[in-house]
Image (spheres, helix red, strand yellow):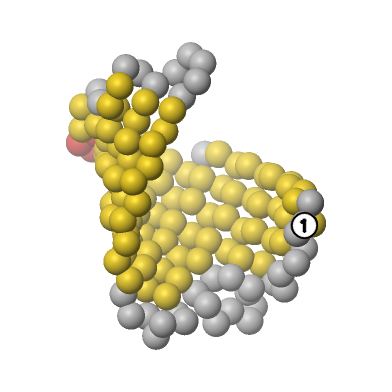
């Protein structure tokens, strides 16, 4: 279980705060179940933004891992009209030595603003670790 608290200050937007609780539970077959609960507050926004995610993670081999996640974000609670629900599949692959990784992330989003019509997107991300991994 992990608990984190962040307080941020942006020169143009002012203060923000983020509280997060993460709970991990090992499962059979090398899977890991993760629940992440987060609340964000920003000085320039009305209300708070709760976020909830449930993930299933697994390392397939020493170079490749995957995550399947379902999440919800409700900005400006209690008067939210822009909720968003997502289904995400992430593949993380070590592509060079022990410090360079590629993330491939297809995602299906169901935004309240669009009448919950699904939006498909994909993200490619590079991750570099500096120092001892």
108 with respect to 34 (left or right):
left
Residue 9 point in image, percent of width and height: 77, 49
- Residue at 44 percent of width and 56 percent of height: 53
Q: Quadrant of residue 77?
A: bottom right
Q: Residues within 10 Å of mark 1 (few under 14, many from 20)?
A: few
Name the outermost residue toward the top: 132
Q: Residue at the spot x=57%, y=55% of the render?
A: 38
* Front-most of residues 127 and 45: 127
Asked which secondary structure carries label 1, the reply is loop
- Asked where in the image residue 43 lies, by quadrant, the reply is bottom right
Image spot of residue 112 (x, y percent): 45, 80
Name the residue rendered at 50%, 74% in the picture: 83
Q: Nearer the viewer, residue 11 or 87?
A: 11
- Closer to the camera in the image, 70 or 26: 70
Residue 92, given in percent of the width and then of the height, sits at: 30, 37
- Please name the residue shown 48% across and 44% down the image: 23
Q: Is residue 132 visible?
A: yes
| Image quadrant assignment for residue 97 | top left
Q: Residue furthest bottom?
A: 115
**Badge 1 is on which residue?**
12
Identify whether 85 is placed above or below 112: above
């Amino acid at each position: 279980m992990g608990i984190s608290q962040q307080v941020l200050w942006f020169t143009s937007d002012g203060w923000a705060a983020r509280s997060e609780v993460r709970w991990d539970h090992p499962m059979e077959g090398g899977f890991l179940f993760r629940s992440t609960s987060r609340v964000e507050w920003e000085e320039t926004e009305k209300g708070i933004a709760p976020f909830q995610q449930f993930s299933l993670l697994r390392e397939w081999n020493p170079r490749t891992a995957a995550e399947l996640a379902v999440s919800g974000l409700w900005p400006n609670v209690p008067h939210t009209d822009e909720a968003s629900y997502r289904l995400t599949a992430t593949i993380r692959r070590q592509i060079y030595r022990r410090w360079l990784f590629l993330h491939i992330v297809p995602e299906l989003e169901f935004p309240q603003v669009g009448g919950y019509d699904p939006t498909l997107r994909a993200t490619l991300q590079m991750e570099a670790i500096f120092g001892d991994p």
